[in-house]
Amino acid sequence: MMKKIILTLYFIGTITFANAEKDHHIPSYDLSHSLMQTIQDDAIIYGDGKKIIYVFIDPLCPYSRKFVTMVSKNPKMIEKYQYHFFLYSVPRLKSTDVVSAIYRSKTPMETLLNIMVEDKVQHDKNDPVTKARVDRIEKVGKELHILKRPYIFIVM
């Protein structure tokens, strides 16, 4: 009986969201790059490399966590690349307070690593400055049609 319910829900979801992918439009490289440059000051930068990589992550997303853990544990990746992390919440993960804790921290990169790699989750309330920062990133994320995290964009 449970299998029938699950299959029925799956098929209803498939039919309901069948057109969602058709509406998904990926902006050009130049437009994407220019949009990301508008939020450059909101990035948390990690690494010393010359090659820039923009990454949209959610601190509670397991895939984002795997990516950040992989990068942080690989010295060559930190030497070769400069990661510009933008915290862009996945709504269902309810990470708003965690994002605020990272952005409000005196050492955002250290806090980000503690949360995402060491699983030492922290929460904090938004303030007007943090909210404005999150709103700018969210606006760009929506314009870029970012649906999944991590979203990785390599600057050529």
Image (cartoon, rainbow, N blue to C red):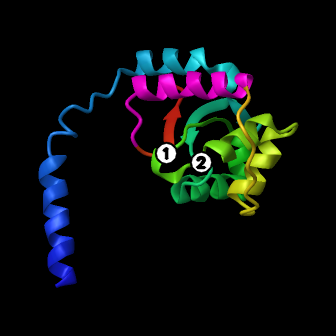
Type of the residue with mark 1: Val
Foreground residue among 31 and 86: 86
Q: What is the C-alpha distance between the residues marked 1 and 2? A: 7 Å
Kindly identify the residue that appears in the image at 73 percent across and 39 percent down: 125
Can you tell which mark lies on residue 90?
1
Kindly identify the residue that appears in the image at 26 percent across and 33 percent down: 24
Residue topped by disc 2: 95
Kindly identify the residue that appears in the image at 71 percent across and 39 percent down: 100
Look at the picture and state if 16 lies above or below 143.
below
Type of the residue with mark 2: Ser
Q: Secondary structure at mark 1?
A: loop
Can you tell which mark lies on residue 138?
none
Compared across the picture, whether 78 is left or right of 88 comes to right
Foreground residue among 39 and 99: 99
Q: Residue furthest right?
A: 106
Compared across the picture, whether 23 is left or right of 102 comes to left
Instruction: Specify the segment rendered in magenta.
Output: 128-147
